[in-house]
Image (cartoon, rainbow, N blue to C red):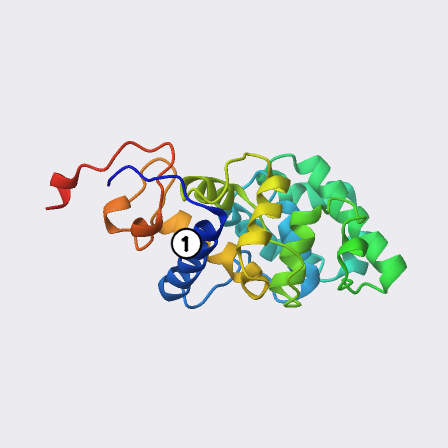
Amino acid sequence: MPRQTRESAVQKKQRTLQIVQRLQLLFPVAECALYHTNAFQLLVATILSAQCTDERVNKSTPELFRRFPDAAALAAASQEEVEEIVRPLGFFRSKAANIRAMAAQLQEQYGGEVPQDLEALVVLPGVGRKTASVVLGTWYGIPSGVVVDTHVKRLTNLLGLVRSDNPEIIERELMELVPQDEWINFSHRLIHHGRRTCIARRPQCAGCGLLPLCRRVSLAPLDDSADS
């Protein structure tokens, strides 16, 4: 691929819109990978997914939700009971404490219902801006921001859309580049792309639908002869 010249803010905005459109074609159905059937389950699963893969979380949550299906049940559970179930997920003691405390606060302040408000969510135990945005976007369809997980951070830097490892900076810049009505699905689609094609240790660049729009920042140049 030829060396890319420095692009203007307008050019980057246009390229971002093209990336959004390509992702829509590549992944027409954009879904959260965490198993859930309601907002409460999604909130719990997202808290548990911190520094852990969605796949591992999905192996533990069916039993967790079977035994503690709502905020009242989880708030009444013992620390030991919850730790036993979430032990495979890492940091299990703090995660168990967080989801129990979160459930207790939900039950006390909101009757067990998950609020549809960013400021109300981020003060719950174990809930940060990313977790709140996942729940608001995925369950309620409210685009409160762009969720920046490890895949989104890696791919947006690789694509040349951002130049930062700070999730807050990345989110702020993406919110300027990506149309608000695509904030929710943009993250979901990038995550799917990162898992299927742009794999961290072995990116499949030659067969990537985003290749014409990608700056491939930090990657070695493609060997054009290998694709001919």
- In the rendered view, tell whether residue 99 sits above or below residue 24: above
Determine the residue located farthest toward the right in the rendered image: 108
Evaluate whether residue 111 shows in this view: yes
Q: What residue type is disc 1 on?
A: Arg
Question: 95 or 29, which lies in front?
Answer: 29
**Residue 90 pos. (x, y %):** 60, 35
Q: Position of residue 158 (x, y in %)?
A: 41, 40
Quadrant containing the N terminus is: top left
- Figure check: 183 above or below 81: below
- Total marks placed: 1
The residue positioned 53% from the left and 51% from the top of the image is 59
Residue shown at the point (63%, 46%) measured from the top left: 48
* Residue to which mark 1 is pinned: 15
Within-10-Å neighbours for mark 1: few <14, some 14–19, many 20+: some
Residue at x 37% of width, y 31% of height: 218
26 and 180: which one is in front?
180
Camera-nearest residue between 204 and 144? 144
Query: In the figure, 110 relative to 201: above or below?
Result: below
Q: Position of residue 191 (x, y in %)?
A: 46, 51
Image-quadrant location for residue 226: top left
Q: Is residue 134 left or right of residue 14?
A: right
Splitting the image into 4 quarters, where does residue 168 fall? top right
Residue 88 drawn at (x, y percent): 57, 39
Specify whether residue 64 is in view: no
